[in-house]
Amino acid sequence: MKDLLPQYKSSRWINKSGETISSCFVYDDVFVEVTLENSLRGRAAVGVVKVAIYMDRSLLFDVNVEQAKYVVVLPPISSKSILVPFKPLHEAKYYYKVFIENNEVYTQLKNDPSRLCVSRRESRLIIERVVKVSKNPGYVVVGRLVDALTGEGIEKAKIKVYDVRTLRNDELLACEVTSKEGAFTVDGLRTYKIGGRLKIYVKFEGDDIYKPAASSYYVVD
């Protein structure tokens, strides 16, 4: 007698707390939860279930970034959920397909809002103060780079200080790396004044976790 196969019931993206999600940040731990069932009273169901996760690329072929196989055994009148762990490494939309004994039983459609949208975190750059130094003519810029959601400092991030120019590109004055609390201090800056005023800003180019950010202009008479 041919083995009875488990039947697909439902699936979803979830976070570590078991909550349904449709978005997360890069490097977050997420899961695909797939629920299977056996609705018969007199027979058990057994089969190999495969879950394949893909990264959606609009102008290129989608990429299979993760897959897992499970042997699922279901007693009569029962159901079971399997969890496929996944850690997204890039900003993109992700979707999955479910296979039972190599037969595709479910796939998230292209415009399905339940597809997982992964993004980098937002950051904020704050200039706390600019101090003029008389001993060695120039300026000291003090500020912080923080996570926009939590307010925690972002360490080991490269920030750039720019002097605003009117008729040509803004001038890069200096670079600095933030401390553990996201703080930075850049000293010895010599800048160009517009109408007797100093106008600068600080920029963060972004990295694999955080999006780019720029501070507001800081004007000193």
Image (cartoon, helix red, strand yellow):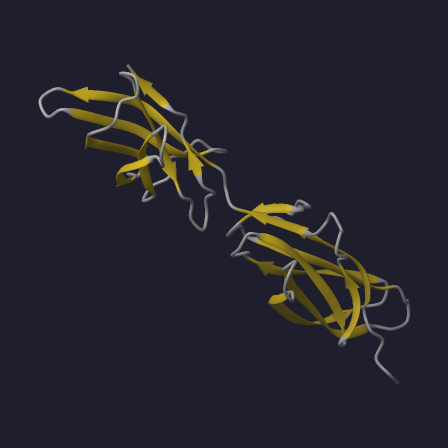
Quadrant for the N terminus, please.
bottom right
| Relative image position of residue 211 (x, y in whole percent) | 47, 43
**In this image, 159 relative to 70: left or right?**
left
Q: Nearer the viewer, residue 194 or 97?
A: 194
In the rendered image of this protein, does residue 208 appear above or below residue 163? below
Query: Which residue is painted at 32% across and 38% down in the image?
Result: 160
Q: Residue furthest left?
A: 135
Query: Which residue is painted at 61% across and 66% down in the image?
Result: 63
Query: Which residue is painted at 59% across and 46% down in the image?
Result: 24
**In this image, 206 relative to 85: left or right?**
left
**In this image, 200 relative to 98: left or right?**
left
Query: Which residue is painted at 50% across and 42% down in the image?
Result: 121
Q: Nearer the viewer, residue 219 or 117?
A: 219
| Relative image position of residue 138 (x, y in whole percent) | 17, 26
Q: Nearer the viewer, residue 138 or 205?
A: 138
**In this image, 189 relative to 212: left or right?**
left
In the rendered image of this protein, does residue 47 appear above or below residue 55? below
